Amino acid sequence: MDKKKRPFEGVIDDIKGRLPCYKQDWSQANYGLRILAPTAYIFFASALPVIAFGEQLSRDTDGSLSTVETLASTAICGIIQAIFGGQPLLILGVAEPTVIMYSYLYSFSKGREELGRELFLAWAGWVCFWTAVMLILLAIFNGCTIINRFTRIAGELFGMLIAVLFVQEAIRGVVSEFSVPESEDPKHEEFQFQWLYTNGLLAVIFAFAVVYTSLKSIEARSWRYGTGWMRSLIADYGVPFAVLVWTAISFAVPGKVPHGVPRRLFAPLPWDAGSLYHWTVVKDMGKVPASYIFLAIVPAVMIAGLYFFDHSVAAQMAQQNEYNLRNPSAYHYDILLLGIMTLICGLLGLPPSNGVLPQSPMHTRSLAVLKRQLMRKKMVKTAKQGMKMQASSSEIYGMMQDVFIQMDSSPEESVHKELKNLKDAVINSDDGSGHPEKFDPAKHIDAHLPVRVNEQRVSNLLQSLLVVGLVFAIPVIRLIPTSVLWGYFAYMAVDSLPGNQFWERLLLLFVTPARRFKVLEGIHASFLESVPFKYTATFTIFQLVYFLICFGITWIPIAGILFPLPFFLLISIREHVLPKFFPPEHLQALDASEYEEIAGLPFSTRTLSLREREDEGDEQNHGLTSQEILDEITTRRGELKHRSLSIKERHYPVSN
């Protein structure tokens, strides 16, 4: 990201860059049935967490906020981002950090006579006001240029903290199913010991069932049974389907069981007085004492930093270079718009929404159009024919380019730009004798065959409108057992661990030296081969200690609102302290960007890869879908991996 020196320079450049694309964001969108698949996919991926966070907020704020407010915030901000946002692929929603911060705000407000529960939302409105001011100032003074200083170590620690907080919430929720809620009358039948115990056991069963079925369903594309479209359907929609199925099963209880067993989600209806009050909370903001208005600056600094980090990283992940997006980025403008949306939410008594992970890169991934399988086979076949004819590198590239143009509808000028990396790889592989002996068609085409993304605003707008529909479907949402949501929290925690290198290195610490070769036999990160184990262990232990400090801060009453502070300090620690203890090359390998990490090649597969066997005439995989191919080149969270050679491939080339 280029450095900007003058105020408003970044925002103005973003507007100038995106404005010419605005019309085509609508006109070139695919309005047919094909747009419905990514719309439904990202809708379910966004809606379920927001519903779960709403239930968490309701419990933490004694009902001052609920699922109605989290859904309303997500819908309003999503519509604004889809219509006015600089990057329409960015998905917005109420996230766990917002829930945590609002829980601290409520605890502080409830313990102050001047505020109390009655002025909690009004005071939170002032917090949002100051947060909006800081975000707008960051955008005006080009603050987005510093986002690259947050390296992988910060993202890993933050991701691990959120995962642990998810587990904590799941455990706390399941345990609470064995007790009487504070606001309920313990004399009711469903709160008698035998029914409390029954409710708790059902909660354990439903929570574990949701975790198990969800984790199994997301692996459906690797199943050997069923057709490609069926496996893709289960993988994409298995999690919401699991929630639906276990909700339905929860009604299959004997008629003698009291109505409140199992316990279900509580949320007021959108037209109830408690929900309608939020739209007029701005009237109470004048009742907040002046001292507390200025005190709101303290939590606002923390929230602004969190939103700035979360929103910018989500935008980065949604528009990675490997997705070949044609439209420019708009980091500064989107932060400015985020400030405005935060202010709107605060004035309406809603928890603000910001860019969320992993939904944002998942959205881009769902819009990826890959004719890759058929195109790849034909291009590899053409390249091998050229090599047999002893054609020059430029001639081989020309033959492959002709195939690409023939099978792709893009303009020829665009094709030249997108195939530039492939052209360079082919031309530079010539050994000078006219025989491209070093050129490997399968590897080079895999590494540089471009991904297509249908850049438009329609899918984001449609999924936001569907969230609006959920606001009015609260009577149906209230049928979901709370234990199903606790299981969903646990699922989100477990699902976030694959791809988190901090977690994988923690597991490595428990592998005995004699058994570490087993790790190298599977797919593994390249740092395992380039970084001595003592540096890997030291770096991991440092991260673990730092993580425990961050987690410990969240347990401090009221002061826990400062939990983002260690992540900001990590910038200076990474730049000035860690280089004194780790050689630069090892630190770079351990702290590489997640989507830049090169996966090592397993020792056991160095003879002939699946792709190479396929090129030798194996046609068994012709049924692979685009999403299955995308799974091979993306992380579980939708981040594209750099498709370059691993260290093992460079040191141990595979013979043809």
Image: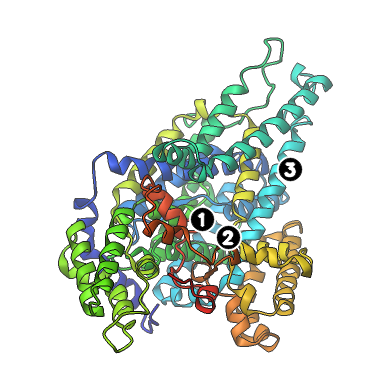
SS at circle 3: helix
The disc label shown at residue 499, or none: 2
Between 615 and 518, the one lying in front of the other is 615
Query: Which residue is tagged 1?
Result: 637
Q: Position of residue 115 (x, y in %)?
A: 65, 50
How many C-alpha atoms fall within 10 Å of the one at disc 3: few (<14), some, or many (≥20)?
Answer: some
576 horizontally vs 204: left or right: left
**In the rendered image, the vertical position of residue 305 relative to residue 276, given as above or below:** below
Between the residue at mark 2 and the residue at mark 3, the CA separation in whole angstroms equals 24 Å
Query: Which residue is tagged 3?
Result: 171
Mark closer to the observer (2, 3): 2
How many C-alpha atoms fall within 10 Å of the one at disc 1: few (<14), some, or many (≥20)?
Answer: many
Q: Position of residue 59 (x, y in %)?
A: 66, 40
Q: Tell me whether the residue at label 2 lies in contact with that at label 1, contact meaning CB atoms closer than 8 angstroms.
A: yes
SS at circle 1: loop
The residue located at (64%, 73%) in the rendering is: 528
Disc 3 marks a residue whose amino acid type is Ile
The residue located at (22%, 79%) in the rendering is: 394
The disc label shown at residue 120, or none: none
| Quadrant occupied by the C terminus | bottom left
SS at circle 2: loop
Q: Tell me whether the residue at label 3 lies in contact with that at label 1, contact meaning CB atoms closer than 8 angstroms.
A: no
